[in-house]
Amino acid sequence: MEIEDITLETIAEKMPFFLEYWPFIITGIVCLLAGFVLFKTALESPGEESLPPEPDLLDELDDLEDEMDLEAEETENNEQIVPALPIDLKHIPLSYTKISPEESLKRTEEFFKLMSNRRTVRFFSPEPVPVEIIRNIIMTAGTAPSGAHTEPWTYVLVSDPKMKQKIRDIVENEERINYERRMGDTWVTDLKPLKTDWEKEYLTTAPYLILVFKQMYGFKENGLKKTHYYNEMSVAIAAGILLTAIHNAGLVSLTSTPLNCGPALRVLLDRPSNEKLTLLLPVGYPAEDATVPDLTRKPLEEILVEI
Ligand SMILES: Cc1cc2nc3c(=O)[nH]c(=O)nc-3n(C[C@H](O)[C@H](O)[C@H](O)COP(=O)(O)O)c2cc1C
């Protein structure tokens, strides 16, 4: 007997089902294998959706993740979630005085005139400024709205000359590396017309430095972490009010976001790890010979879309 006959006979004898349905069985096995391979590939290789996000979204994602982690943690730890504000918070009549449209118009014109003179100043006078003025300015910044009224800000006011020098050392050290290595040609070239460089004399000349920290989260009375919703946006709004209050007081400042200095300055100023440095502002009077770049601002037609 030939081998083929033996094989067929054996199969027919032992597995009559296979002999009759073998094309379907083989197709089934092939489909199962293909399905398994496809499934594994989909799990292992990054699809379009798992591509790394744009770098400028990373911070926001970070913040959002923090918020989600916190929520999860609180839900896990708390059978009954306690609100950060008192559950029986009183609601009171709004304190409001209506003014006429004419008065409104006059005020908006005057306020625009005042604010259009605000400039970023890089040359400061060492002339002292009464600290009460700065405290009032910071109190005004503290009137800003914030996500769920979490007030996620801390203002560190530095006037001690030794501390200002330490801050300057940290900032200049990092800024030198930023300008020489980290920022890249395009950024450095974009800054050339503003004549900024790594040297920051104003950090020791200005009578005050205000360092604005955002609190990424806080703590409830029961010790649990408190989510600070939209803390970045809340602190940015407060910073706008701070700058406006500085200008309104007849003082000048320089908005700066010292690159890579945050952790060192946080430690130097003894701030807790839930706080992150967002802005460093020297505040005082301008130097007598202070100059500013001759900039113009976009006209209303370019910044306003009316629908
Ligand atoms: C977020 C932010 C960061 C800034 N960082 C710096 C800085 O590190 N150094 C600096 O000299 N100016 C800095 N500036 C100031 C801008 O250069 C300035 O606002 C801009 O040139 C417009 O000038 P003006 O403020 O006089 O209208 C910063 C401004 C902003 C809003």
Image: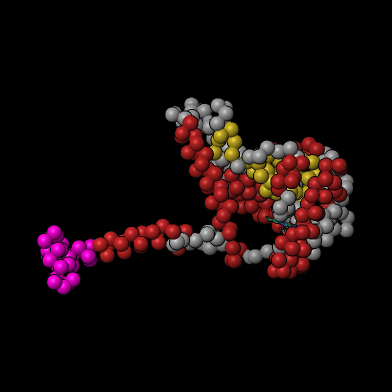
Q: Residue 56, relative to residue 227: is it above or below?
A: below
Residue 152 locus on image (x, y percent): 61, 40
Question: At 77% across and 57% down in the image, what residue appears?
Answer: 175
Question: At 52% across and 39% down in the image, what residue appears?
Answer: 70
Residue 20 forms part of the magenta stretch: yes
In this view, the residue in front, 255 or 240, is 255
Q: Identify the magenta region.
A: 1-28
Q: Quadrant of residue 49?
A: bottom left
Q: Name the main secondary structure of what is drawn in magenta.
A: helix
- Quadrant of ligand 1: it is bottom right
Question: At 52% across and 47% down in the image, what residue appears?
Answer: 64
Residue 165 locus on image (x, y percent): 85, 46
Q: Quadrant of residue 173?
A: bottom right
Please give left or right for residue 135 compared with residue 276 in the image: right
> Which corner quadrant holds the N terminus?
bottom left
Residue 213 locus on image (x, y percent): 68, 43
Residue 95 locus on image (x, y percent): 57, 35
